[in-house]
Each structure stands twice: as structure tokens, then as C-alpha cells.
Image (tube, rainbow, N blue to C red):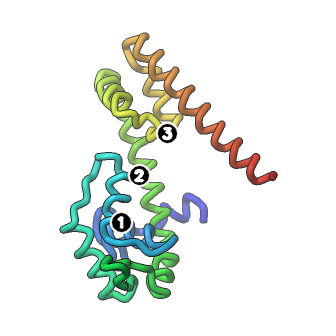
Amino acid sequence: MVESEILSKDFKLFLPTPEKLTPIQALILIQLLGNSKYGYEILRNLRDAFHGSWEPKTGTIYPSLQALEKKGYVSKRVKDETTHYSLTKQGNEKLREMSDIIAYYLLFNSRFIESTVANMPASFTQEVFMKIHLAGIDEMIPEAPILEAIRELPDKDVKRVFLERRIEILERKIKLVKKHLKNLDS
């Protein structure tokens, strides 16, 4: 599927998916694709994945798991006094059907970041970038909009810091890609 096909979908962002799943339920199903997990493990994985930008609570995760079980997408079994949740065949099929929606959300988020960065005035951009830099999440901004925004920053020293950081990020990404290519050839 190409970008234009993904963007042509009429999804209602921030609402349950056309499949009547909330974004949290979709995240839970995705986590269960690999293997079964217990509730707290799902909660911890989500907390870790969001790096403090979202703190899911048990009052969100367990009702979502119950709703998924009621829909037949998740099954549970108790093992060593711990309830483990697994994706059912129906849940796996539903998640596969939702691949367009998931692709759309990912594309939308990327475009949202690009649009936000492209439309911020330089002084505000510098303030936002400094917070992103201090939080250690520089990698989240796509290259083209960040380089254009950095070009517009008023402070030359701050520009240098951000450009040097971009080099570090890109070198780390290139190293990772080369490692995967090497593993592919071995």
C-alpha cells in the first residue's frame, strides 16, 4: 500500500477505530502478537514504550483486556496464580485487518510532527527543540522538517548543538542498519 492509498482512508482520528477498538485496545493486541503476557507485563511494556509521556494505569489496561476478551479477541488462562492473556485466532485476524488503520495512524503522526515543526516560529522552535533535546528524544523528529527548522534558529551555538546531535543520531541509525545488513548476509 502506498502513502496516497493510506491517506485516502476516511479514518476518524482519536476515536475508536472502525473496528470498534480503542487505540489502547489496539496497542494491547499488538503486544500480544508475539506471545502471551500477563496484565502487569502489558502495563509495564506500555509505560516503558512511552518513556514517561503517557502513564497507563491498571484502571485502563484491565478493563481494555476484559473488553477484548468479551469480543473474542483475547483469551486468558491462569498459570502459577497469574492470569496470562493471549491473542485468539479471531484477534489475530482482526489485527491483520486493521493493518491499514495502523499504517494510517503512523503516517498521520509523522505528518503531524512535520507540520508542527514546519509551522513554528524560530524562537518557539528553539524552546521546543531544547526541551526535546534535554528529554533525549531528538530521534522523534523527521530529518527534513528539523533541518529546515534548525536553519531558522536565531542562536548559532544552539544550531550547532542540534546539528551535531542530528549527526550522532544518523550515525547511530546507519550503524544499526549496517548491523542488520551484515546479519542478513551471514
In whole angstroms, how far apart are the C-alphas of marks 3 and 1? 28 Å
The residue tagged 3 is 142
Closest to the observer, 100 or 177: 177
Q: Where does label 2 land, which residue?
A: 109
Q: Position of residue 80 (x, y in %)?
A: 35, 79
Which amino acid type is marked by label 2?
A: Asn
Asked if the residue at tag 1 contacts the one at tag 2, i.e. Cβ–Cβ closer than 8 Å, the answer is no
Q: Which residue shows up at 45% across the image and 85% down it? A: 88
Q: Secondary structure at mark 1?
A: helix
Q: Residue at x 39, y 53 (%)?
A: 49
3 and 2 marks in contact (CB < 8 Å): no
Question: Three-letter amino acid code at disc 1?
Answer: Ile
Q: Residue at x 50, y 83 (%)?
A: 93
Q: Which residue is mark 1?
A: 42
- Can you say whether 141 is above or below 8 in the image? above
Q: Report the label total.
A: 3
Q: Nearer the viewer, residue 111 or 4?
A: 111
The extreme right residue here reads 185
**Disc 2 crowd, CA 10 A, few/some/many (<14, 14-19, 20+):** few
